Structure formats: structure tokens, C-alpha cells
Image (spheres, grey):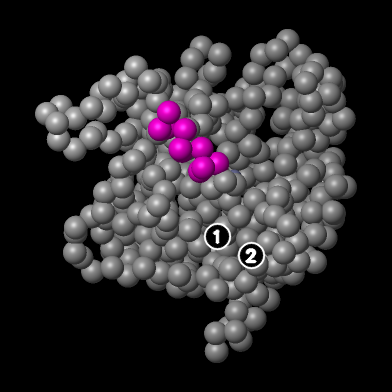
């Protein structure tokens, strides 16, 4: 829940004291501002159509509800109903039998609202501090993990989730980062295909996170606030190396569907992303936490959504609250101009210092992005969705 870390922005005010003198006004006029203090209020007067519900009942492909209390889960169910979110995918299930506990907790507190994906389990019973003891570094890992996936699916899971730690965090017994296309994972990708469940994969991160955190970096504020998100330096693979490795996996397993999280971390280059989608028919993307990027290029993004309408899925990341849902509804459904991509004027824009524009998608494309594509590739989702839609219709009638 990135939102929680927002308080850390205040740290920006403590920038090195040597620079404090620079805050003195040049000619005895108003004092200078620090970047994090700047909250310009646009004087622009244009038509605005803020939205609090999606036009069609939607599926939120990317949520993390595991840290919510029982009460917060019950509140979230109400938020979903109010926003017309029929079903959300929880990406927080643990692989193997442990998924049952997560499923039970969700169905007790937010009945029928969630479908669950499980995480790739690299560690097993190993020591968190010692990669040599991790299951991923023991012989036969791939098949063991594949069997855990089978067990999870038997208990009700509908997909596999990978975090960016594959490629940027998980190490082999010699202390080297494992590449996303390491062959030890092949049995897992293959099993997902055999089970008919998709793999939702967060690989790499925004390209700016692989660049130096300096005055030229357009995500400077965010990297200053979260320095651990910087992957600049020799100890990390490049952004392209990670994406290319991920694509080799997707090409090697044409019978497995892969949903590349966060617009495959290529929303700044939709032409390149389009080519990858052309080359890999089993590849999909989801929009979570990337509307700042999509909404600053409305002409290009609209073309992209029209061209790849059957390959794009709707998602928010985080618990799936209105601050993230509402601007995304507005971006997808309206032609509104220059509005914030997070519904909270007190916050510094968390993913780049700009506002966004709507891309006004036609209804048939909205239907595909909001739910049709998801129902096609996530098993079990259709029943859950139809059941909730019936109830949502009752509520709004
Ligand atoms: Zn996530």
C-alpha cells in the first residue's frame, strides 16, 4: 500500500542544510519553494466530468488486500459496490495449501468480491537471510513449485503472481541475481499453461528507475522518497535485459497466458509495447499504477487501446480504493483535460509531476478492458463476475 508511505514525502524538506541559504530570496522578495512544497492550482477552466463509478461493472485485475483488517475488508466490499467493481483479483495468495486461509478470510469479510492468484514461492522453508537455503536453489525446484501451483488451483486459486524480485532480488546459491528466463522455472510456466491459469508478472520497473536519481530524472521526487526503488548501477540488469528475458519466457511457453503487470513497464514507449504484443499472442497487459503515463499521451494511448483492445486489462494496484479508481475511470471514459491522476490535491503527484487527459474510449472497448478480456483468460472469474453483476444491478435498480 504505497499510499501509506506518502508521509515520507515530508523528508524532502530536510534537504541538505548547505542548500538552505539558496532559499533566501534573490532580491529580498518572496522566499523560494522546495519542489515538494509546490502545489500549483490550475486556473484552467474546461469542462470536467469526474467519475466515481465505472460505466460497466468491472474487474480490478491487480489488488493487494492481504494487509487489511476484517473491518477494512468489509469497507472495501462497500467501496467496490459503490464504484461498480464486480470482482477484484487478490494477488496476495500464498502458494500451496496456505492459499486456503487467504480465501477463507476474503470470503468471510468480502464474500464473492475476490478471486485469488498465488505468489511464486522462492524461499520455501529456507532462511530469509540465506539464499543458499532457499527452495529455488535446491534441485527439483521447478516441479515442486509447479505442484504447489496445482495444489493452490485445486483449492480455488485462479492464477500465479510474480513480483519484480525475479530479476531484481532473488539470488542463486552463488549470490547472483536469477534471470527472469532462468530455465529452472520452466516447469512452472508449463504447468500454468496445463492448468489453464494465467501468470500475472511484474517484471522490471519504470525505465526512469534504472537511470541516475538526478536533476534530469523525471521521477526524481519518487526516487528521493523511496531510494530503494532505484535500480541504477552495475549490480542490476538493465531495464531492457529484464524485459527481453521475460519475452523469451513468454515466447517459450505459447500455451501459457502471461499478463504483464503495469503495462509491462513500457507505458512510456507504446510503439515498442505494441510490437511485443504483436510478436507474443499469449501476452496481455494491465493498467495498474500506470495511468500517469498513459494519460499524459492521450492521442497515442487512445490509438494503442483501440489497436490492442483485446489485450488490455483494467487494474489499480493497492487495495483498490477510490483515489486510484476514480481518475482511471475518468481517463478511460472521458475526454477531460489536465486533471490529477490521484484523487488527493494535498499530495505531491506520486508518479511524475504532471496531470493527465482522458482518452474517451468507445463502449465496446471499455467493455473489453473493464471485464471481457479478464473473463476470457482467468478461469472461474466468469461465474464470480456474473453473480456479482446480478447483485450490483439489484443495488442500483
Ligand atoms: Zn502490485
- Which range is magenta? 5-14
Tell me where residue 365 sits by quadrant: bottom left
Q: Foreground: 196 or 267?
A: 267
Q: How far across and down, in percent of the image, does residue 38 sit?
A: 30, 42
Assign a secondary structure to mark 2.
helix
Assign a secondary structure to mark 1.
loop
Crowd tier of the residue under label 1, counting other residues whose Cα lies within 10 Å: few below 14, some 14–19, many 20 or above: some
Q: Label 1 belongs to which residue?
A: 321
13 within the magenta span: yes
Q: How far across and down, in percent of the image, does residue 384 sit?
A: 69, 69
User: In this rendering, does residue 155 appear at all?
Assistant: yes
Crowd tier of the residue under label 2, counting other residues whose Cα lies within 10 Å: few below 14, some 14–19, many 20 or above: many
Residue at the image point whose x is 67% and y is 49% from the top: 91
Residue at the image point whose x is 11% and y is 29% from the top: 27
User: In this rendering, does residue 143 appear at all?
Assistant: no
| Cα separation between marks 1 and 2 | 7 Å
* 291 versus 392 height, above or below: above
Q: Label 2 belongs to which residue?
A: 76
Q: How far across and down, in percent of the image, does residue 193 sit?
A: 70, 45
Q: Which callout, 1 or 2, points at the residue further toward the start of the chain?
A: 2
Q: Quadrant of ligand 1?
A: top right
Q: Foreground: 339 or 210?
A: 339
173 within the magenta span: no
* 293 versus 84 height, above or below: above
Residue at the image point whose x is 42% and y is 58% from the top: 343
Quadrant placement of the C terminus: bottom right
* 232 versus 30 height, above or below: above
Tell me where residue 168 sits by quadrant: top right
Q: Are marks 1 and 2 in contact (CB under 8 Å)?
A: yes
Amino acid at each position: 500500500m504505497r499510499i501509506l508511505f506518502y508521509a515520507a514525502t515530508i523528508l524532502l524538506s530536510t534537504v541538505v542544510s548547505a542548500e538552505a541559504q539558496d532559499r533566501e530570496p534573490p532580491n529580498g522578495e518572496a522566499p523560494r519553494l522546495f519542489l515538494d512544497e509546490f502545489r500549483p492550482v490550475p486556473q484552467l477552466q474546461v469542462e470536467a466530468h469526474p467519475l466515481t463509478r465505472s460505466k460497466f461493472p468491472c474487474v480490478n485485475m491487480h489488488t493487494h488486500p492481504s494487509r487489511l483488517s476484517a473491518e477494512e475488508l468489509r469497507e472495501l466490499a462497500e467501496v467496490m459496490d459503490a464504484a461498480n467493481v464486480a470482482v477484484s483479483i487478490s494477488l496476495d495468495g500464498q502458494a500451496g495449501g496456505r492459499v486456503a486461509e487467504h480465501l477463507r478470510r476474503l470470503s468471510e469479510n468480502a464474500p464473492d468480491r475476490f478471486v485469488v492468484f498465488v505468489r511464486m514461492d522462492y524461499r520455501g522453508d529456507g532462511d530469509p537471510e540465506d539464499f543458499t537455503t532457499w527452495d529455488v536453489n535446491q534441485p527439483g525446484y521447478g516441479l515442486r513449485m509447479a505442484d504447489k501451483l496445482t495444489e493452490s488451483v485445486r483449492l480455488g486459486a485462479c492464477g500465479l503472481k510474480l513480483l519484480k524480485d525475479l530479476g531484481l532480488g532473488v539470488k542463486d546459491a552463488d549470490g547472483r541475481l536469477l534471470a527472469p528466463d532462468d530455465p529452472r522455472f520452466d516447469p512452472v510456466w508449463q504447468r500454468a499453461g496445463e492448468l489453464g491459469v494465467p501468470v500475472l508478472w511484474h517484471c522490471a520497473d519504470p525505465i526512469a528507475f534504472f537511470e541516475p536519481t538526478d536533476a534530469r530524472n523525471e521521477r526524481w521526487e519518487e526516487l528521493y522518497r523511496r531510494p530503494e526503488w532505484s535500480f541504477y548501477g552495475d549490480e542490476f540488469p538493465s531495464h531492457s535485459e529484464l524485459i527481453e528475458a521475460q519475452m523469451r519466457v513468454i515466447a517459450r511457453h505459447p500455451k501459457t497466458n502471461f499478463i504483464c503487470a503495469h503495462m509491462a513497464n513500457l507505458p512510456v514507449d507504446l510503439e515498442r509495447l505494441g510490437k511485443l504484443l504483436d510478436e507474443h499472442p499469449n501476452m496481455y497487459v494491465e493498467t495498474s499504477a500506470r495511468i500517469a503515463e498513459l494519460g499524459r499521451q492521450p492521442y497515442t494511448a487512445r490509438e494503442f487501446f483501440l489497436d490492442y483492445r483485446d489485450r488490455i486489462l483494467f487494474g489499480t494496484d493497492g487495495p483498490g480504493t477510490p483515489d486510484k479508481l476514480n481518475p482511471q475511470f475518468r481517463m478511460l471514459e472521458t475526454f477531460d483535460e489536465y486533471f490529477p491522476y490521484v484523487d488527493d490535491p494535498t499530495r505531491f503527484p506520486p508518479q511524475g509531476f504532471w496531470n493527465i487527459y482522458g482518452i474517451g474510449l468507445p463502449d465496446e472497448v471499455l467493455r473489453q478492458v473493464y471485464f471481457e478480456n479478464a473473463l476470457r483468460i482467468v478461469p472461474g472469474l466468469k461465474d464470480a463476475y456474473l453473480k456479482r453483476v446480478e447483485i450490483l444491478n439489484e443495488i442500483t435498480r
